[in-house]
Image (tube, rainbow, N blue to C red):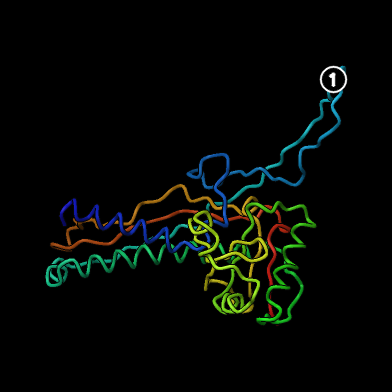
């Protein structure tokens, strides 16, 4: 494959992979340490810095603070590695190569999303309300999640809600829903499909069967994915395959929720 052609394909794969990462807004990438060591540390934000009344003559009392750290294991290491025979590729110019590159990018993004959602579900807090959502109660239940987060001191800016396609259909039928077209470029750029009760709404089919939505804040949801081999076409020179290449890529990453109260999981019975 020509170098320019491969660069064009790789660029398209990168764009499609980013677009298929439904949960990328829901995680932050802040950490300390090198992911190549197999784990990184994240600061745990359980308390806020205190404030006081300032005295112009005496100044302000110097307080102390402490920062604890939580370790995130880089425990996921995924790859794609698929043979493309040179004769088959030549028989269908561009078709096989482009299609398999597109599929490889989608598959890695889907796996990353699925693992991230699983972490949110298992490490978040169950809302304890198993009444199934309907178009008449979906807004009320989302407002309940909003109130619970606010009562826990979770900031408004940076919140998100992940919904299933079924839940999103109910949201669309709710008169309180504001479509993405009315929200401006800021929401569109995050990949949100709209906003409800102050939450940017992200649709995903990676939630478990009994999970209807996850509402949380990205400051306490962590994703480390610094090490990767970009998806591309590599010629095989293994002494066995002649005139063949492979679609290859690899990504090592990890997820963690550092404050369970900042992630609420709505399930149904």
Left or right, 15 with reference to 57: left
Q: Label 1: which residue?
A: 56
Q: Quadrant of the N terminus?
A: bottom left
Identify the residue at horizontal 12%, vertical 72% (top origin). 91
Q: Nearer the viewer, residue 160 or 173?
A: 173
Q: Label 1, secondary structure: give it.
A: loop
Q: Nearer the viewer, residue 254 or 17?
A: 17
Percent x, y of residue 266: 69, 72
Query: Considering only vertical position in the picture, is 5 above or below 65?
Result: below
Identify the residue at horizontal 79%, vertical 31% (top origin). 64
Left or right, 98 with reference to 164: left
Query: Considering only vertical position in the picture, is 157 above or below 136?
Result: above
Residue lying farthest to the front in this orientation? 182
Left or right, 246 with reference to 120: left
Quarter-of-image position of residue 103: bottom left
Left or right, 226 with reference to 158: left
Label total for image: 1
Percent x, y of residue 17: 39, 60
Percent x, y of residue 105: 36, 62
Percent x, y of residue 56: 85, 20
Q: Quadrant of the C terminus?
A: bottom right
Q: How packed is label 1: few (under 14 Cα within 10 Å), some, or many (20 or more)?
A: few
Query: Considering only vertical position in the picture, is 266 above or below 79?
Result: below
């Amino acid at each position: 494959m020509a170098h320019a052609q491969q660069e064009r394909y790789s660029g398209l794969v990168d764009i499609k992979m980013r677009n298929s990462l439904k949960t990328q807004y829901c995680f932050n990438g802040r950490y300390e340490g090198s992911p190549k060591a197999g784990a990184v540390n994240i600061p745990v934000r359980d308390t806020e810095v205190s404030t006081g009344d300032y005295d112009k003559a005496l100044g302000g009392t110097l307080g102390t603070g402490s920062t604890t750290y939580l370790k995130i294991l880089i425990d996921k290491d995924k790859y794609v590695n698929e043979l493309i025979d040179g004769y088959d590729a030549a028989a269908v110019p561009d078709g096989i190569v482009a299609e398999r590159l597109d599929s490889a990018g989608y598959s890695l993004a889907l796996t990353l999303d699925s693992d991230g959602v699983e972490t949110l579900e298992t490490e978040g807090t169950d809302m304890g309300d198993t009444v199934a959502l309907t178009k008449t109660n979906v807004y009320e239940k989302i407002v309940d999640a909003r109130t619970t987060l606010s009562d826990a001191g979770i900031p408004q800016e940076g919140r998100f809600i992940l919904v299933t396609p079924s839940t999103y259909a109910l949201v669309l039928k709710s008169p309180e829903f504001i479509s993405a077209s009315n929200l401006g470029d800021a929401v569109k750029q995050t990949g949100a499909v709209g906003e409800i009760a102050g939450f940017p709404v992200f649709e995903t089919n990676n939630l478990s069967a009994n999970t209807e939505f996850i509402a949380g804040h990205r400051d306490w949801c962590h994703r480390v994915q610094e090490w990767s081999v970009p998806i591309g076409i590599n010629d095989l020179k293994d002494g066995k395959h002649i005139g063949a290449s492979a679609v290859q890529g690899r990504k090592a990453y990890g997820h963690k929720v550092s404050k369970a109260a900042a992630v609420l999981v709505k399930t149904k019975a």
